[in-house]
Amino acid sequence: MFELLGVPPQALFGQLLLGLINGAFYALLSLGLAVIFGMLNVINFTHGAQYMMGAFAAWMLLQYAGLPFWVALVVAPLIIGLTGIIVERLLLSRLYHLDHLYGLLLTFGLALIFEGLFRKQFGSSGLPYQNPLPGGVNLGFMFLPWYRGFIVMFSLVVCLGTWFLIERTKLGAYLRAATENPQLVQAFGINVPRMITLTYGFGVALAGLAGVLAAPIYSVTPVMGANLIIVVFAVVVIGGMGSILGSIVTGFGLGIVEGFTKVFYPEASNTVIFIIMAIVLMIRPAGLFGTQR
Amino acid sequence: MKSNDSLMILALAAALAVAPFFIYPVFLMKVLCFALFACAFNLLIGYVGLLSFGHAMFFGFAAYVSGYTVKTWGFPTEIGILAGMLVSAALGLVAGLIAIRRQGIYFAMVTLALAQMVFFFCVQAKFTGGEDGIQSIPRRALFGVIDIRNDFTLYYVVLAIFLAGFLVIYRTIHSPFGQVLKAIRENEPRAISLGYKVDNYKLLAFVLSAALSGLAGATKAIVFQLATLTDVTWQMSGEVVLMTLVGGMGTVLGPFVGAAIIIAMQNYLAQFGEWVLVIQGVIFVTTVMLFRRGVVGEIGAYLAKARGTAKE
Amino acid sequence: MRGTFKAAAAAALLSAGSFGAQAQMTDGVIKIGVLTDMSGLYADFTGQGSVWSARKAVEDFGAAAKGIKVEVIGADHQNKADISSNIARQWFDVDKVDVIVDLVSTTTALAVNSIGREKNKVVLVSGAATSDLTGSQCSPNSIHWVYDTWSLANGTGNALAKTADGKSWFFVTADYAFGHALERDTSAVVEKNGGKVLGKVRHPFPGQDFSSFLLQAQASKAQVIGLANAGGDTTNAIKQAAEFGIVQGGQKLASLLIFISDIHSLGLKTAQGLTFTEAWYWDLNDNNRAYAKEFAPANKGVQPSMVHAGVYSSVLHYLKAVTALGSDGDGAKVISKMKEMPTEDRLFGKGVVRQDGRKIHDMYLFQVKKPEESKGPWDYYKLASTIPASEAFRPIEQGGCPLVK
């Protein structure tokens, strides 16, 4: 067998798989951002906080209601989506007539509030959440915990399901039409404002879902989403906001790139995505899958 | 309108000149540094319509540069501040070249991501001292004669720097260059069709804003005698947005007022620890929802309205 | 400004003097400022608990009965050097604070350390870890009370490298000065004991996903994986190590800096078997338990950390020194009095403060209990061994502190 820069191929396969797992989170989060952006033209800065809230929701469901992970996987995103709907109805919807930057500023403020409240309530050291699928399988080249395998499969299903919903169903067709020309769609008797609300709720629920998935492997802390969201922003810029599929592919792809960086030059693994972003912007300002607006 | 402005600026300068007799000078210096930072930021958002969410990279990196040149290389204070400013301008040129390829929300995200990259660089780089930062930066006599170890003296130096930076911004806004910037903000396609090289104008404004942010950061490093990671975090970028928003985007005095409000709040709410973040968020949200013109903008609008009704 | 302050202080001294029998405290009051992390990453083992501990020390000292007025105030430094430096200057210059205690992150401690020196006040550090405070940055106005990076590295490295299955190490290190220092100090100890460092990987700070680095550590077949990081990085790494079955695979995890609140957040199931060094544990003896019994109800049911205990101990000793001296005006004098007097309190027992500002006491090597060994929340540690005071800290001549001649 060949060796690449002194790293045996077995180790490389392992890192590839791990990268894919991280990519699953990037994909879920950037997908949520893309869905929201497509419909509302708002960059949802609260996304990271909502991801954090998803993890906390799972913890609270377990702690206070005794509901296990598998129930939380369904219930927690619904709760987070509901909070998103409230935010949209009460606040965001009043800003649509203004510059889109105000949406960004509003959601930034909200992120601070959510983060601050959770810090106040739960402290910053984090809370324990047990792994619902302990153990794993030895693949020969690496030990794969069941749960990590589950994350990849599950998020892939969710991502492709979302893509199918938006690109291949009638509901999705309405949605895309409403993005292009809201007045016209409204004239056809479709309640566009409600569709916007539900879209925001759905995008936020995706963030919540990612949070629930993260709870068993990452520390559940109020700041868990704060730094992640910026990486996801970079992922979104690289992919371009043009297509749903684009955000999924970029998410997984960048996870893998980051995984390789951790083997060959670990010191740069935090920055590699930003560097790629800068390069992509120089060559293709609209992003890999985007169309210049 | 313009004479009105200069009157206000003179009044502000006069008030600032006597302020340290009543208020703790170190606190005032902090306000001035952040006010300059916010003014520099306002140049972009208020007059070019570009929301940079990564301005901390200029502010914080300049602090490191000025701290390092003064402490480790032993250069005089004024060289340190100048070096910080120049390096920030250079950084602004690079970041600007990348970022101005996108507009609006994308621009905000790109600047944010670039700033995060600078942050990670500062965490790992040797010369920044990582978590420790650069500590105990000496306050060397300015131009070899002015002893700035005394807070009181240093205050007037900082005030001079602030006013200089402030006037540069003011002059820029009211120059033909500033008029083109405003035209770009109002209607970019039209500015392009009029034959303006829009990107060059934007880039120049970006570099200027970066340099002045650097000036503010470099000065702050001298005042507090330290340069740390705090100033390069994205939270710092968010803070300067908040200051400008609260004071009033696109107003001359807004950023100063906003900086004063936010710094005072942080200072006097320090014992409420946990709540500072929440309160900042609430201010953010209320301003966006209800007072989009900010304090100065709302007062201006009120006065204009009052004048309007008086005329009738 | 300094002039007016001195004048005010002198006036206060005069007026205090006119009361006669009272000790000569500047402005008649000893003002203790607890500058700590109330909202950030470290708030759980410092924060309000530190303020409570300072107040408790004042109460136990019996200040009121002795006719000495003591005031305790607290503020949040948010782990930011500029905020802490701003508050410290204002406290010293305007609010007449005499001593600042706690100081959690390295940056804030170093910043206030130099301000205290410049203004000749007293700085008693409990929360921060950097050994520089008693090394190159040591000051005649500061004491470093509880622990430092050297003592942690030394305690854990020594104890493990002496055992047969602790000879080969692999480090997972946070890529910044603090992580490098921990890694360097521990490597030295391990090698001194005949151990070997097989490799290391530097992870970016802050990190979230450690699986990649842990796999590299696993592949190295080292007996011990040393985590040279702190806070969220450490808890994430431990959580993921459990997921990948690293401990079950026969490798040992050694965390070089961890607090009881971190163990609490991990849960015993994940953290069991972890070995580390600390200066104090609430369930170690009757005195500590008695303190914890008072502490917990006042602090949301949380048990005190070693930092809380350190704040208590340092404030108590400070008050003793000031009373013995009869004045709190000259910070350097107070500190030399504190170094002169042996320390004694109910939490740390007997000890001394060294010339370089290092407070000396025993350190302990703990191991996290298995879930079935624990009687309930906060019952987490098993004492593995005691590191005697004489060996627990860096020998004074190796620190490079300019105060030591």
Image (spheres, coloured by chain):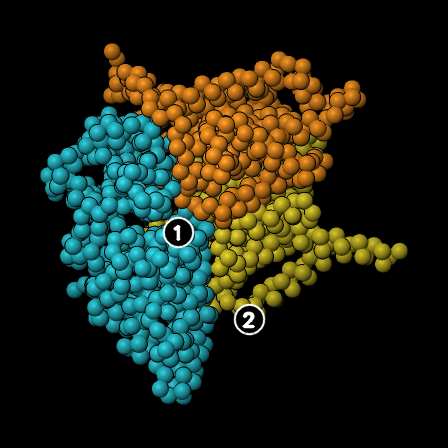
Chain colours: A orange, B yellow, C cyan
Please state the horizontal and vertical placement of residue B62, each as a whole percent of the image: 44, 48
Q: What is the three-letter code of the residue carrying label 1?
A: Val
Q: Name the secondary structure under disc 2.
A: loop
Give the residue drawn at x 31%, y 79%.
Answer: C326
Q: Indicate the quadrant containing the C terminus of chain C: top left, top right, bottom left or bottom right.
A: bottom left
Query: Which residue corresponds to mark 1?
Result: C302
Q: Is residue B134 visible?
A: no
Q: Is residue C109 above or below residue B288?
A: below
Q: Position of residue C125 (x, y in %)?
A: 32, 59
Give the camera-side residue of B78 and A253: A253
Tell me whether marks 2 and 1 sit on the same chain. no
Q: Chain of mark 2?
A: B
Q: Secondary structure at mark 1?
A: loop
Q: Which residue sits furthest top?
A: A1
Could one spot residue B283 in this view of the protein? Answer: yes
Furthest toward the right, the residue is B312
Residue at the disc numbered 2: B22
Q: Chain of mark 1?
A: C
